[in-house]
Amino acid sequence: MSSTAASGGVVAVRALDPAARGTVVARLDRGTGVLDPERRTLRTKPVALDRKVLLALTSSKKRTGLMVERGWRRVFLPLIEVHGGAALGIPADVARALADELDSRGTRETTAVIAPLRAHADHLDAGLPVASSPLGRYMGLGGGGALTSLGDF
């Protein structure tokens, strides 16, 4: 699902919607620290990860994502989405690579971001389902949110 390298290389973040068929939504160049979205708009443009970057987890009833902003530039990365009653999430290696890069480049968290990304990766590595991921609590897990209605997998 992604291509990651221990140092250098590129991390590809793919769309979670099955209809998108795994298209890449953004790439993180680990050498330069640039997060480059596939689709660009007036504000959605490549962002250099550094101390001026603000990070925030955003959520709705069916999605938790990562908003990366630097000035007027921003990139949104899907982390967990619910489609057709199934919870889909980014793979553990992608979550861990994102957390490592965001941490090593000194980005600023407006909400906790790095620890939940690492917890999500550990959760998946332990063989547990996406529906019970620590990132799911931002969607109302245990509080009547979309993931709660999925039941146990």
Image (cartoon, grey):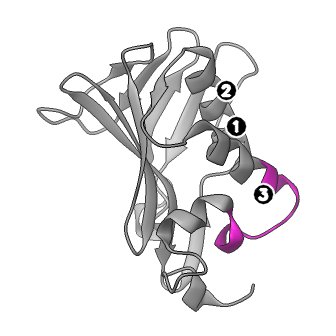
Magenta highlight range: 122-133
Category of crowding for the residue at label 2, using alpha-carbon neighbours closer than 10 angstroms: few (below 14), some (14–19), many (at least 20): some
User: x%, y% of residue 97?
Assistant: 66, 31
Q: Quadrant of residue 75?
A: top left
Q: Quadrant of residue 132?
A: bottom right
| Of the pair 104 and 11, the residue shown nearer to us | 104
Position of residue 25 in the picture relative to residue 33 (left or right): left
- Pointer 3: what residue? 124
Residue 152 drawn above or below residue 2 = below
Rounded to the nearest angstrom, the CA distance separating label 1 from label 2 is 6 Å
**Most distant residue in the left direction:** 42
Category of crowding for the residue at label 1, using alpha-carbon neighbours closer than 10 angstroms: few (below 14), some (14–19), many (at least 20): many
- Pointer 2: what residue? 100
- Pointer 1: what residue? 96
| Of the pair 73 and 12, the residue shown nearer to us | 73
Q: Are marks 1 and 3 in contact (CB under 8 Å)?
A: no
Residue at (70% x, 53% y) in the render: 120
Q: Secondary structure at mark 1?
A: helix
Within the magenta stretch, is there residue 123?
Answer: yes
User: x%, y% of residue 54?
Assistant: 38, 28
Residue at (58% x, 75% y) in the render: 141
Q: Are marks 1 and 2 in contact (CB under 8 Å)?
A: yes
Within the magenta stretch, is there residue 56?
Answer: no
Residue 111 drawn above or below residue 49 = below
Rounded to the nearest angstrom, the CA distance separating label 3 from label 2 is 17 Å
